[in-house]
Image: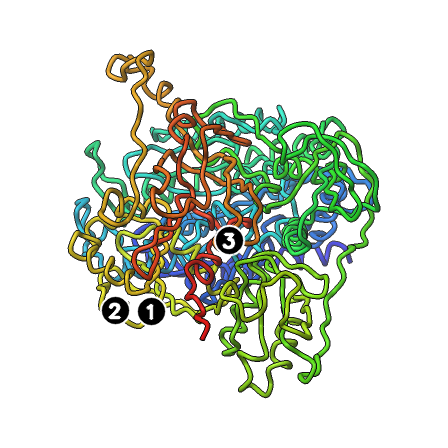
Amino acid sequence: MHRFFTLFALFLSCHLFAQLKSPSEFLGYEIGTEFSRHADVVRYFEHVAANSNRVTYHSYGKTNERRPLTYAIISSPENLVNIDEIRTNNLRQAGTLDGDSNPEIAIVWLSYNVHGNEASSLEASMVTLYKLITEKQAWLENTVVIIDPCINPDGRDRYANWYNQVRANPYNPIQIASEHNEPWPGGRPNHYLFDLNRDWAWATQVESQQRLKIYNQWLPHVHVDFHEQGINEPYYFAPAAEPYHEIISSWQRDFQTQIGKNNAKYFDNEGWLFFTRQFFDLLYPSYGDTYPTYMGSIGMTYEQAGHGRGGLGVHTDEGYELTLVDRVAHHTTTGLSTVEISSMNAKKLNTEFKKFFDNSKLNVKSYVLKGHPDKIKTLTDLLDLHEIKYGFSSGGTVSGMDYQTNNKGSMDSKGALVVSTNQPKGKMVTVLFEKDTKVTEPLTYDITAWSIPYAYGLDCIASTSLVAANSSDPTKRVINQVAPASSLAGYIVSWNGLNDAAFLAELLQQDIKVRFSEKDLSFKGDTFQKGSLVITKSDNRNRTDFTEVVTNTANKHGRNLYVATTSFSDNGTDFGSRDVKIINKSKIAMLKGKGTSSLNYGALWHFMETQLQYPVTSIDTDDFSIAVLENFDVLVIPGGWYQRLLNDSLLGELKDWIKKGGKVIAFDNALSVFEDKDGFDLKKNKEKEDENKEKTNLVPYGERERYSVTDHNPGSIYKVKMDPSHPMAFGYGETYYSLKLGTDSYQLLEEGYNVGYIDNDVLVVSGFSGEDAKTSLKNSLVFGEARLGEGSIIYLVDDVLFRSFWENGKLLFVNSLFFVNSNVFELD
């Protein structure tokens, strides 16, 4: 009987194999001679799964544009029968599931096409899949391979569809040809123009959120993120460049080198150039190589020449033609090589993976956080996505490093959120929460500071003791009852964060009139800080459903309504005071298109649509004129380069529009267009000559890059002084911690309001910033408002919505939209 089943299985395998087609046979063209659409790749993976007993194919979600997000599991037939046991045994050795296990099967995850226009990797995913099951079956006996063929289907199809429309036939390899020059915004980002390779840890995008659920069900031993770089670069693979985060184990370092040498063997054999240990470091935690690394994996980036300029073939500056066929071959080779060496070291991978989750040597044992319950909830939602455990303290004094004072301090921990490193993902907790990441090499590929307590605006004590916590959240759910209209003067809602902002946005869209107070309020002994919302019966006397709409909206957003039975205050600021101002139902326009930073625009677009949920009209820079602003109150200018668009003539017209009551909110490097322009009150700080500093032209060639770090700020956190009496700063205290990128330094406004600024005492609380960079930021503007006639221009030197993860900055933007220079209510 056993022999019968063995023969039957062999027959079935041969029958399935006979129907299996290669990618080229299935699609009807040689891979690398066309750009495949995402739907074609999905169809091919479905075909393989239907015709091979070594592959199963699954969906884990959909993109914003409704394309499927998928992954394939590839292994031996026997392993696939036991695949859930293999998966759970791996989680047991990581400690995320109860029980003990000592598995010896390697788990390798290959992620392709996170950047849509780095398009060779999706093609390579099909070839890699086919070769694994037809030529490399022996590796699959002790290895499970997971392939995500396209992390970013929306960006992929944006690029592929554009290229297929504009390409010449045959393709034109000349660099200036239109097929090598994508239009704005390019295929790199996702639907909301986010860089998904910077979103692993912050999980602001649906692709990341859905992928993390599957990733954390596996926790692979090896993870490769396939990319492309400029057309003139050779191939890059591990080992990575410095800096490495100090949490990375010696084994993770060593095995990267082993993988690199195995890749090099194949590249040397083919005569393909490559480089290692340059540019691509392992520090910032939200990459497709670092996030897996901090979760115990050997996380790596592989970079092939090509990118959006590659097309089907392009002439490089070195005089040879780089083809898509070449690019696919390179990515296929490294993918297979990585599976091979992982299979050869399967037992060791498991042993070292298990060791990684021993967190007994971590110095900080608990991060204890306090702040507004909404901010705590936003953070715990993020922790839930990563399956990081947390609890709440029942009380007691906790001592340790105080993030607010930058010194040793203590906190009454009653009700505080406690995130301990005494859990399987304790190393990831350390990376995300540590106050100041150690940077061994300042020339990094990305920002060097991201500490969650600063990003979320929370007080934090990092304690070397394990702080007791339970799972009971002390926050009580808010349920408001409809107040009798006859005894109601209005409602007051405190202004603390984005939940309050979303509540306001929905009320405005329901045509409920809302005010805010520029002074502290006091009614019958209850006090409310500046910025509190005031919703009066008088303003809404024509609404018979007033109390129901306000109450239902408040309950939807979890807002606590204070029912005011009188508008007569304790402190002289009554509902009718000129300090209690009507909030306009603003009509907002925002620039997009050529010249605009697609990343900054995308973050703003995503925020308005998915978080604030308030309408905004995007206007392409090619269609922009002052005349189109007649129907808008606010113009948002994302970071970008607008010198051609906002020439002197148009800038003059814009100034006139502002003077009539318009409002401009300018982000980041968009401020440069207003520098030294009459009436805008914006000037750059001048660099001071340092007589002791060596002249740059005398620095030796080999030392120039190292010398430049003194002026370098790749992304660090600065302490900013705030004016909490200004409407832009409502909901904030006297200190704000800003993620500052670069060294743009503007003088304090002479006539306007310096709402946030760095004074002569420059303090970098986290990350690397060169000494000259710090000096240049003395006495510099961070956030400000300049008045022009009846209107305003608001300057946000730092991007308060950076990658949508700097949660504590978002209210500054909302305040700028609705509170700053609100029309004064004139008394009769």
The answer to whether residue 363 is visible is yes
Rendered residue at 54%/73% (across/down): 507
Q: Earlier in the sequence, mark 3 or mark 2?
A: 2
Please say if the residues under marks 2 and 1 sit with CB atoms less than 8 Å apart.
yes
Q: How is the image coloured?
A: rainbow
Q: Amino acid at mark 2?
A: Val
Seen at 44% across and 54% down, the residue is 603
- Residue 810's tag is 3
Taking depth in this image into account, of 704 and 339 the one nearest to the observer is: 704
Q: Which mark is residue 632?
A: 1
Q: Position of residue 416 (x, y in %)?
A: 75, 46
Say what amino acid the circle numbered 1 marks: Phe
How many numbered markers are drawn?
Answer: 3
Mark 2 = which residue?
A: 628
Q: Secondary structure at mark 1?
A: loop
Q: In the rendered image, which quarter is residue 363 located in?
A: top right
Picture coordinates of residue 571, whole percent (x, y):
63, 60
Specify the quadrant that holds the N terminus. bottom right
Q: CA distance from mark 3 to mark 2?
A: 27 Å
Front in this rendered view, residue 426 or 90:
426
- Counting residues from the start of the chain, the first of labels 3 and 1 encountered is 1
The answer to whether residue 270 is above or below residue 553 is above
Gap in angstroms between the C-alphas marked 3 and 1: 22 Å
